[in-house]
Image (spheres, helix red, strand yellow):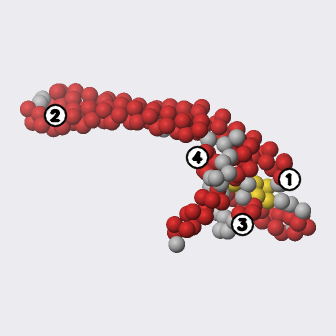
Amino acid sequence: MRKHLFLLIFLYLCSNSTYIYGQKFGYIDTEFILSKVKEYKEAEEEIQKLGERYQKEVSDKFAEVAKYTQEFKAEEILLTEEMKKERQDTITSKDKKARELQKKVFGFEGLIFLKRNELIKPIQEKVYLAVEKVCKKKQIQMMFDKSSELIMVYTDPKHDYTDFVLDELGVGDKKDSIDNKKKSEFVKGE
């Protein structure tokens, strides 16, 4: 959806060449920017640890269901119909609880989603404010994100404002600019 909106806006502006003539465009690489923000790395690590802890809990619940199912199958011949029904109901109940826990933790708006939102949203807002400041300073009317779903077939490095955003965030490094990263990847690829 976001990709299509950018494309429509861009096509509209291109069709109105007198309007686009005075416009200044740029792009950034938010993945690269976020990789340089210490708080983002820490938040990602915390979310990963939390996810691993919950994954173990969920896996244990499903392992318990599998164990009960295996035991039931091994003893099924010896059980009365009433005992079979009781065991099946227990297995179904345990399976339902395991699935509910999985959904509660990993589902849409689950605990992991909420924790990610809590930790990452302030960092994203900080990045967006830095982008806005760079756009105002450099008089850029439209900034694209190279790492989003918007497909950029070719980008001229002179329109890359990633380093300016990093500087605005206070995490810029003259030795490790995005241009240097691209050059080193280009050399490796040859």
Quote the CA–CA distance across marks 1 and 4. Answer: 26 Å
Residue at left offset 84%, top offset 48%: 137
Q: Residues within 10 Å of mark 3 (few under 14, many from 20)?
A: few
Residue 126 figure quarter: top right
Residue hosting label 4: 35
The numbered mark, 1 or 4, whose residue comes first in the sequence reads: 4
Q: Is residue 125 left or right of residue 19?
A: left
Drawn side of residue 38 relative to residue 91, left or right: right
Q: Residue at x 59, y 36 (%)?
A: 39
Residue 175 coordinates in the image, percent (x, y): 64, 53
* Residue displayed at 26% across by 28% down: 90
Gap in angstroms between the C-alphas marked 3 and 1 = 18 Å
Instruction: Give the residue number, with chain letter if any, for mark 3.
Output: 156
Q: Which residue lies under the disc numbered 2? A: 71
Amino acid at dot 2: Glu
- Whether residue 42 can be seen here: yes
In this rendering, is residue 178 above or below 122?
below
Observer-nearest of 34 and 168: 168
Answer with mark 2 or mark 1, whichever residue precedes in sequence.
Answer: 2
Disc 1 marks which residue? 139
| Residue type (three-letter) at the residue carrying disc 1 | Gln
Callout 2: SS: helix
Give the x, y percent position of residue 74: 12, 37
